[in-house]
Amino acid sequence: MPKFQFARIDRLPPYVFAVVNDLKMKLRRAGEDIVDLGMGNPDLPTPQHIVNKLCEAAQNPKNHRYSQTKGLFKLREALALWYKRKYNVDLDPETEVITTIGSKEGLAHLALTLINPGDVAIVPAPAYPIHPYSIIIAGGDVRSIPLLTDEGFDKEAFFEAILKAYKESWPRPKLLILNFPHNPTTATVDLSFFEKVVDFARENNLIVIQDIAYAEISFDGYVPPSILQVKGAKEVAVEFYSLSKTYSMAGWRVGFAAGNKEIIHALYRMKSYLDYGMFQPIQIAAIIALKGDQSCVEEYRKIYERRRDVLVEGLNRIGWSVEKPKATMFVWAKIPEKFRAMGSLEFSKMLLLDGKVAVSPGIGFGEYGDEYVRFALVENELRIKQAVRGIKRAFEKYGLRNIKV
Ligand SMILES: Cc1ncc(COP(=O)(O)O)c(C=O)c1O
């Protein structure tokens, strides 16, 4: 019997990804060359002009003091300009934008701001873990709706599932969390989907949080819409954007929430008790990221697109049939039938031990994930080819050639 009880921590299950990570480290220490396509941790460097600005700003002692919780005005303005440039959306940087220490921090503290014990939030599953767990940490209840991609993503059915979950829940859900392009399933939507969501949310006083971390990583001409493009969205919605993926700035921790004033102000009130904003040189460099030379965005997008092609075409060649995603830096692959019964954790361990490839087991993303694994496109094309050869070897070890899912 432990001496102390931590009720909030007790609601958090053990981190499944740690099992694969620990095994990967063990194999690497034993000298194995593991291609790591597990965590969505970008390998590309932050573009040099952004790093240079950080170094320059760090030399100025004025930037060593506490900054502002909301973020520098010029940074909030740069985000508003990004929305104008990309989506023709007008945002008031003073009242409709706040910076966050990465969008993960923002999402977690926004849930803490909005959710009281017993409040209900509708969250798709599988999901990026902070989407459901921010609600759990805040003491709320999650109403899961399946985000299924077996036969392709059916937006209509998904929208119906939102309505059903809303109507069947009591107390009525306060919050809906969306994330398109979606991690881990890579599902995408068009603007008409967001229009329907906003209509419903306005009629029912439902708050919508939409996470657009993969806004700039999309392929084959597809451009992910912003929920803020919908007329009236600002009455009910807040969207989170992040520099982690677009500019390969994951370690810098720069994110934003934009949209409904009341919600942005509430998040500001909460954060003003918790932090003093990001280190100011990081904020100054982030302004340069958003307002400076944008050629890196296209360059990085193309790199992810080529990696996607190499991986998906490679997997298909060895008989693992997988669709090309339209966005994100992931491939969400249904485990071949012959291995499906072992579950995603055991299958991932098998890929590590026999194929020398690390992937994320789908079960780590919650309900409806266990028949899948997620590949993150965070190693170069040669290494991805090496991963495909490793997987082929692993399958052959079990006597499987050209297995079809
Ligand atoms: C959907 C989604 N949202 C948010 C994040 C985290 O972003 P940040 O680095 O801004 O906290 C990730 C990171 O993988 C993500 O996949």
Image (cartoon, grey):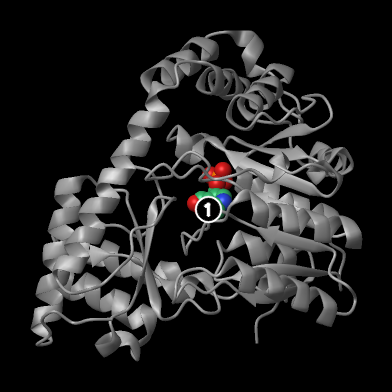
x%, y% of residue 53? 48, 14
* Above or below, 353 relative to 387: below
* Above or below, 56 relative to 267: above
Image point (17%, 61%), residue name? 314
| Amino acid at circle 1 | Pro
Front residue of this view, candidates 281 and 294 = 294
Can residue 102 be spotted in the picture? Answer: no
Front residue of this view, candidates 226 and 368 = 226
Q: Is mark 1 within 8 Å of ligand 1?
A: no
Query: Label 1: how many residues lie within 10 Å, few (<14), some (14-19) or many (20+)?
Result: many
x%, y% of residue 356? 18, 66
Quadrant including the N terminus: bottom right
Image point (38%, 26%), residue name? 296
Image point (64%, 61%), residue name? 131
x%, y% of residue 348? 31, 74
* Above or below, 152 relative to 52: below
Quadrant including the C terminus: bottom left
Image point (90%, 60%), residue name? 203
On the image, numbered disc 1 is attached to which residue?
181
Task: Please give the count of numbered marks on the rendered protein.
Answer: 1
Q: Secondary structure at mark 1?
A: loop
Can residue 293 be spotted in the picture? Answer: yes
x%, y% of residue 166? 81, 74
Query: In the figure, residue 274 lies in which quadrant?
Result: top right
